[in-house]
Amino acid sequence: MDDDTIPFDEEDEARAGKLKHPYVTMFHLAFRVTAIVVYIFCGWFSKSFIASFVTVILLLSMDFWTVKNITGRLMVGLRWWNYVDDNGISHWVFESRKGAKQNRINPSEARIFWLALIISPILWGVFVLVALFGLKPKWLLLAFIALILNGANLYGYVKCKIGSNKNISSATSDFFKKQVIHNVTTMMAKSPPTGNFSQPTNII
């Protein structure tokens, strides 16, 4: 069977000032936003927990697949996946565009991608805490599943961004070290000279 997917490095160029992939961007937001809305308001429309559970899980599954396989590749030039080799060993692969190809990414789409990717797990984390302290085990299970699915995509794309062989904590530490060094260097460059100057003696 022929592969009809778009090659990883051959997406169309974006027009200046416009979203490069407006429909992809819409679907990047649609499933996860709808899942959150349904989770919050499903009690208003249905008393059946099973119906609400199935609806949210379906939305989360569609969101996970869409973000993992489509929106990350097209919006930010990143992708990750897992495969099992002939020896039964599982391998995780994290890819990102390099060099000039990275410049083809639309900044607006990249901001939307990362904001949605980060904010969504935070919200589900809040829902987990609310269900936990509210003693609602059924809703806790649903929110926890959502947190895992959203967190998996976030983790995968962060690994793509910082490099698959680099630990996230060490990358964060390196980032702050670079910022401190940069700030110190900037302050030293702006500091006034402290050289010795001859003082007038008022002696004629």
Image (spheres, rainbow, N blue to C red):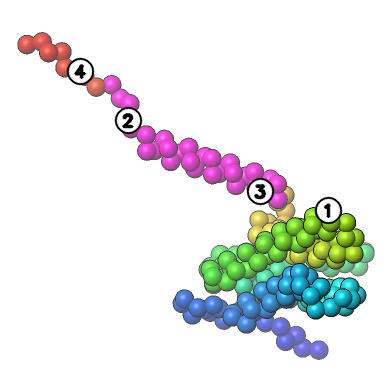
Q: Residue 151, percent across and down?
A: 76, 61
Residue segment shown in magenta = 168-196
Quadrant of the snapshot with the N terminus: bottom right
* Neighbourhood count class around disc 1 (C-alpha, 10 Å): few under 14, some 14–19, many 20 upward: few
Taking 13 as reference, is 27 left or right? right
Q: Nearer the viewer, mark 1 or mark 4?
A: 1
Which residue is drawn at the image coordinates 88% and 56% (left, top)?
135
Residue 169 inside the magenta-drawn segment: yes
Q: Hey, what amino acid is under mark 2?
A: Pro
Query: Which disc is residue 184 wearing?
Result: none
Q: Quadrant of residue 121?
A: bottom right
Q: Residue 141, percent across and down?
A: 88, 63
Tell me which label, 2 or 4, sits earlier in the chain. Answer: 2
Position above or below: 2 against 182:
below
> Pointer 4: what residue?
199
Tell me which label, 2 or 3, sits earlier in the chain. Answer: 3
Q: Secondary structure at mark 2?
A: loop
Q: Hey, what amino acid is under mark 4?
A: Gln
Tell me which label, 1 or 2, sits earlier in the chain. Answer: 1
Q: Quadrant of residue 28?
A: bottom right
* Neighbourhood count class around disc 4 (C-alpha, 10 Å): few under 14, some 14–19, many 20 upward: few
Which residue is drawn at the image coordinates 39% and 38% (left, top)?
189
Tell me which label, 4 or 3, sits earlier in the chain. Answer: 3
